[in-house]
Image: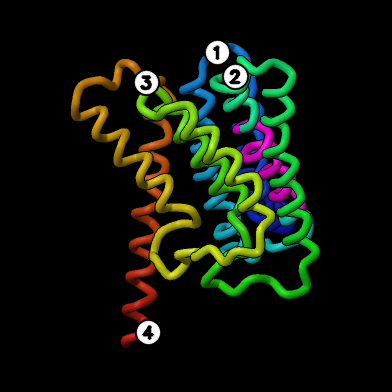
Amino acid sequence: MQMRTRLIKSIPNMFTLGNLFCGFLSIGFAASGQYSNAAILILIGMMLDSMDGRLARMLNADGELGKELDSLADVVTFGVAPSFLVYYTYFYQFGILGMAIAGLFPLFGAYRLARFNISTSKSSGKYFTGVPITAAGGILALLTLFGNLIPQIVTTVIFTAFCFLMVSKIKIPSFKDVPLPKYGTIVTLFLGASLFIVYKGTYAQYPYLIYIAIPLYIAFLAYRFVRVRGKNRRETD
C-alpha cells in the first residue's frame, strides 16, 4: 500500500521530467536542423508543464522536490531550448555575437524563476509579475514554427523584448479564471492553427509529433471541462 502511494505521488514528477526531456530533445532536433520538431517539442513541454502542478494538487503530492524540479525543467525547456532554436534559425548569421545574444534568454529566464522562488509575497492568482518563462519560450517556439510567414526582424524584436519583460515588474494577466490549463490560450491557438493546416491538406509538410500533441491536449481539455462543470454543479446544488 505504501509503495502504491509513493508511486501515485511520483506521477507529477514524471510529467515534469517528461517536460525536461522534451527540452533536451528539442535542443537535439534544433542542432540537427529539424526546427519544426524542435518547436513542437517545446509546445508539448508546455502541455506537460500545465499538467504537473494540477496533478500534484489532485493527488496531494505537493512538495519542495517537485517545485525545484519544475523550475529546473522550465529553464531547460523554455529557456535553453528556445534560445538554441532561435540561434539556429535566425542568429547564426551573426556568429559569436548571435550566440551571445541568444544566450541572454535563458539567463533572464533563470533569474526570473529564482526571483519567483524566493519571493515571500507570491503574485495573486489574477496576474504574474513579469512574463512567465513558459509563455515566453512557447511564443518563441510558435514564431519559429511559422517562421516562413514572419519577418526575421519581428522575431528578433520579440526575442529581445521577452528577455527584459521576464525580469520586469509589469503585471501580466494570468487568465487563471478561464477554465483552461495554465498557458492554455497559447497552446490552443497553436492547435487551432494546426487543425487549419490539416484542413487545407498541407499537413504532410509538418512533423508527425503534432499528432501526438493534439490528442493529448484535447483529452486534457475535455477532462478539465468535465471537472469544472461538475464542480459548478455541486456548488449550485
Query: Could you give the CA–CA distance between mark 4 and mark 3, rounded to whole angstroms?
Result: 44 Å
Residue type beneath disc 3: Tyr
Residue 234 on image: x %, y %: 36, 81
- Range drawn in magenta: 68-82
Q: Nearer the viewer, mark 3 or mark 1?
A: 1
How packed mark 3 is, by other alpha carbons closer than 10 Å (few <14, some 14-19, many 20 or more), is some
Query: Could you give the CA–CA distance between mark 3 and mark 1, rounded to whole angstroms?
Result: 14 Å
Task: State yes or no: discs 1 and 2 in contact (Cβ < 8 Å).
Answer: yes
How packed mark 2 is, by other alpha carbons closer than 10 Å (few <14, some 14-19, many 20 or more), is some
Q: Nearer the viewer, mark 2 or mark 4?
A: 2
Residue 219 on image: x %, y %: 37, 47
Residue 88 is tagged as 2
Which of the marked residues, 3 or 2, is nearer the chain's N terminus?
2
The image quadrant where one finds the C terminus is bottom left
Which of the marked residues, 2 or 4, is nearer the chain's N terminus?
2
Residue 74 on image: x %, y %: 66, 44
Which of the marked residues, 4 or 3, is nearer the chain's N terminus?
3
Task: State yes or no: discs 3 and 1 in contact (Cβ < 8 Å).
Answer: no
Q: Which residue is mark 1?
A: 33
Q: Which residue is mark 3?
A: 206
Classify residue 83 as left or right of residue 36. Answer: right
Query: Could you give the CA–CA distance between mark 1 and mark 2, rounded to whole angstroms?
Result: 8 Å
Classify residue 94 as left or right of residue 69. Answer: left
